[in-house]
Protein backbone atom coordinates (compact mmCIF):
# COMPACT_ATOMS: atom_id res chain seq x y z
CA UNK A 1 0.00 0.00 0.00
CA UNK A 2 1.56 3.24 -1.11
CA UNK A 3 0.89 6.57 0.40
CA UNK A 4 1.06 9.62 -1.76
CA UNK A 5 2.61 12.62 -0.17
CA UNK A 6 1.83 16.00 -1.50
CA UNK A 7 4.57 18.54 -1.55
CA UNK A 8 3.55 21.97 -0.33
CA UNK A 9 3.31 24.43 -3.17
CA UNK A 10 5.95 27.11 -2.80
CA UNK A 11 4.58 30.58 -3.19
CA UNK A 12 6.05 34.03 -3.34
CA UNK A 13 4.30 37.15 -2.13
CA UNK A 14 3.92 40.03 -4.55
CA UNK A 15 2.66 43.57 -4.14
CA UNK A 16 0.13 44.44 -6.84
CA UNK A 17 -0.29 48.03 -7.97
CA UNK A 18 -1.87 49.87 -10.87
CA UNK A 19 -0.33 52.12 -13.48
CA UNK A 20 -3.05 53.56 -15.68
CA UNK A 21 -5.46 50.77 -16.60
CA UNK A 22 -2.90 47.99 -16.08
CA UNK A 23 -1.93 45.98 -13.02
CA UNK A 24 1.70 45.24 -12.22
CA UNK A 25 3.44 43.54 -9.33
CA UNK A 26 6.84 43.20 -7.70
CA UNK A 27 8.10 40.65 -5.23
CA UNK A 28 7.28 41.90 -1.75
CA UNK A 29 10.87 41.19 -0.65
CA UNK A 30 11.96 44.35 -2.48
CA UNK A 31 9.40 46.67 -0.86
CA UNK A 32 10.12 48.45 2.40
CA UNK A 33 7.03 50.63 2.61
CA UNK A 34 4.22 52.40 0.80
CA UNK A 35 3.67 56.11 1.35
CA UNK A 36 1.49 58.90 0.00
CA UNK A 37 3.13 61.33 -2.39
CA UNK A 38 4.57 64.14 -0.34
CA UNK A 39 6.18 67.34 -1.47
CA UNK A 40 8.19 66.49 -4.55
CA UNK A 41 11.27 68.54 -5.38
CA UNK A 42 12.08 68.46 -9.11
CA UNK A 43 15.70 67.93 -10.14
CA UNK A 44 16.74 70.14 -13.09
CA UNK A 45 17.96 68.36 -16.22
CA UNK A 46 16.95 64.93 -14.93
CA UNK A 47 15.81 62.17 -17.31
CA UNK A 48 12.08 62.05 -18.12
CA UNK A 49 11.38 59.14 -15.76
CA UNK A 50 12.96 60.87 -12.74
CA UNK A 51 10.24 63.07 -11.26
CA UNK A 52 12.33 64.44 -8.42
CA UNK A 53 13.09 63.68 -4.79
CA UNK A 54 11.23 63.60 -1.50
CA UNK A 55 12.49 63.74 2.06
CA UNK A 56 11.45 60.47 3.67
CA UNK A 57 12.30 60.74 7.38
CA UNK A 58 15.59 62.48 6.65
CA UNK A 59 16.54 60.29 3.67
CA UNK A 60 16.60 61.79 0.19
CA UNK A 61 14.56 59.41 -1.95
CA UNK A 62 14.53 59.57 -5.76
CA UNK A 63 11.04 59.23 -7.20
CA UNK A 64 10.67 57.75 -10.64
CA UNK A 65 7.61 57.43 -12.82
CA UNK A 66 7.59 53.83 -14.07
CA UNK A 67 4.90 54.80 -16.60
CA UNK A 68 7.57 56.58 -18.65
CA UNK A 69 9.81 53.53 -18.96
CA UNK A 70 6.92 51.09 -19.40
CA UNK A 71 5.10 53.18 -22.01
CA UNK A 72 1.95 53.67 -19.90
CA UNK A 73 -0.04 56.86 -20.42
CA UNK A 74 -1.34 58.98 -17.58
CA UNK A 75 -0.54 61.46 -14.86
CA UNK A 76 1.97 60.86 -12.09
CA UNK A 77 0.56 58.52 -9.45
CA UNK A 78 -0.04 59.69 -5.88
CA UNK A 79 1.20 56.61 -4.01
CA UNK A 80 4.86 55.68 -3.72
CA UNK A 81 6.26 52.18 -3.42
CA UNK A 82 9.60 52.52 -1.64
CA UNK A 83 12.17 49.86 -2.52
CA UNK A 84 14.84 48.35 -0.33
CA UNK A 85 17.89 50.44 -1.16
CA UNK A 86 20.20 47.43 -1.07
CA UNK A 87 18.84 46.19 -4.43
CA UNK A 88 20.58 49.10 -6.13
CA UNK A 89 24.36 48.98 -6.51
CA UNK A 90 24.90 52.31 -4.78
CA UNK A 91 22.28 51.82 -2.02
CA UNK A 92 20.13 54.72 -3.24
CA UNK A 93 16.67 55.12 -1.82
CA UNK A 94 14.21 54.86 -4.71
CA UNK A 95 10.44 54.98 -4.93
CA UNK A 96 8.03 54.40 -7.80
CA UNK A 97 5.00 56.66 -8.18
CA UNK A 98 1.99 54.39 -8.75
CA UNK A 99 -1.71 55.13 -9.16
CA UNK A 100 -2.88 52.75 -6.46
CA UNK A 101 -1.70 49.82 -4.40
CA UNK A 102 -4.08 46.89 -4.81
CA UNK A 103 -3.05 43.98 -2.58
CA UNK A 104 -0.40 41.51 -1.50
CA UNK A 105 -0.93 38.13 -3.20
CA UNK A 106 0.61 34.69 -2.90
CA UNK A 107 1.80 33.50 -6.32
CA UNK A 108 3.03 30.00 -7.17
CA UNK A 109 5.38 29.25 -10.06
CA UNK A 110 2.55 27.52 -11.93
CA UNK A 111 0.58 30.80 -11.89
CA UNK A 112 3.29 32.60 -13.87
CA UNK A 113 3.55 32.49 -17.67
CA UNK A 114 6.55 33.62 -19.67
CA UNK A 115 6.34 37.09 -21.14
CA UNK A 116 5.92 37.18 -24.92
CA UNK A 117 8.35 40.11 -24.90
CA UNK A 118 11.98 39.36 -24.08
CA UNK A 119 12.77 42.11 -21.58
CA UNK A 120 14.94 41.63 -18.52
CA UNK A 121 12.65 43.67 -16.31
CA UNK A 122 9.57 41.49 -16.97
CA UNK A 123 9.66 38.38 -14.81
CA UNK A 124 6.41 36.99 -16.21
CA UNK A 125 2.65 37.33 -16.57
CA UNK A 126 0.07 36.24 -14.03
CA UNK A 127 -3.37 35.41 -15.47
CA UNK A 128 -6.28 36.76 -13.43
CA UNK A 129 -9.74 36.09 -14.81
CA UNK A 130 -9.62 37.85 -18.18
CA UNK A 131 -6.68 40.11 -17.34
CA UNK A 132 -2.95 39.81 -16.80
CA UNK A 133 -0.74 41.12 -14.03
CA UNK A 134 2.74 42.01 -15.29
CA UNK A 135 5.44 40.89 -12.84
CA UNK A 136 8.26 43.44 -12.85
CA UNK A 137 11.81 42.86 -11.59
CA UNK A 138 12.95 46.13 -9.94
CA UNK A 139 16.59 44.95 -9.91
CA UNK A 140 16.79 45.21 -13.70
CA UNK A 141 14.14 47.81 -14.48
CA UNK A 142 16.41 50.76 -13.69
CA UNK A 143 18.84 49.60 -16.38
CA UNK A 144 16.08 49.65 -18.97
CA UNK A 145 14.93 53.08 -17.77
CA UNK A 146 18.40 54.45 -18.42
CA UNK A 147 20.59 53.10 -15.65
CA UNK A 148 21.10 53.75 -11.99
CA UNK A 149 23.22 56.81 -12.69
CA UNK A 150 19.98 58.50 -13.82
CA UNK A 151 18.66 58.10 -10.29
CA UNK A 152 21.58 59.97 -8.81
CA UNK A 153 20.82 62.96 -6.66
CA UNK A 154 23.40 65.69 -7.28
CA UNK A 155 25.71 66.39 -4.35
CA UNK A 156 24.34 69.01 -1.99
CA UNK A 157 20.71 68.30 -2.88
Image: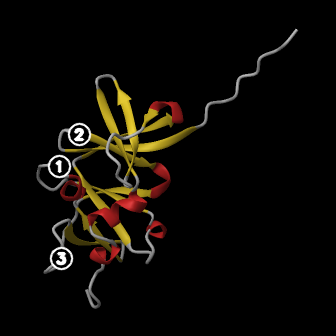
Mark 3, residues whose alpha carbon is within 10 Å: few (<14), some, or many (≥20)? some
Q: Which mark is residue 72?
A: 1
Q: In the image, residue 57 lies at what x, y percent? A: 36, 72
Q: In the image, residue 107 lies at what x, y percent? A: 49, 35
Q: In the image, residue 49 lies at what x, y percent? A: 20, 65
State the SS at label 2: strand
Mark 1, residues whose alpha carbon is within 10 Å: few (<14), some, or many (≥20)? some
Q: Are marks 3 and 1 in contact (CB under 8 Å)?
A: no
- In the image, taking residue 8 as reference, residue 133 lies left or right, namely left
State the SS at label 3: loop
- In the image, taking residue 141 as reference, residue 1 lies left or right, namely right
Question: From this viewpoint, which residue is outermost toward the bottom?
Answer: 156
Quarter holding residue 24: top left
Disc 3 from disc 1: Cα separation: 19 Å
Q: Are marks 1 and 2 in contact (CB under 8 Å)?
A: yes
Name the residue located 27 percent from the left edge and 69 percent from the top edge.
146
Label located before the other in sequence (1 or 2): 2
Closer to us: 157 or 30 = 30
Label located before the other in sequence (2 or 3): 2
Closer to us: 35 or 3 = 3
Question: From this viewpoint, which residue is outermost toward the right?
Answer: 1
Q: Which mark is residue 22?
A: 2
Name the residue located 23 percent from the left edge and 53 percent from the top edge.
70
Determine whether 50 is above or below 123 in the image.
below
Disc 1 from disc 2: Cα separation: 8 Å
Disc 2 from disc 3: Cα separation: 26 Å
Name the residue located 13 percent from the left edge and 80 percent from the top edge.
44
Residue with the mark numbered 3: 46
Label located before the other in sequence (3 or 1): 3
Determine whether 48 is above or below 133 in the image.
below
Quarter of the image containing the C terminus? bottom left
Amino acid sequence: MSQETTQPVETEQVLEFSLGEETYCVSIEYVTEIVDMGELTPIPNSPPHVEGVIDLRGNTTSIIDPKVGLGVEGELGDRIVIFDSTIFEDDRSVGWAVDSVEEVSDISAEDVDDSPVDRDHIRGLIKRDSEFVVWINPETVSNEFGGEEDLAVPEGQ
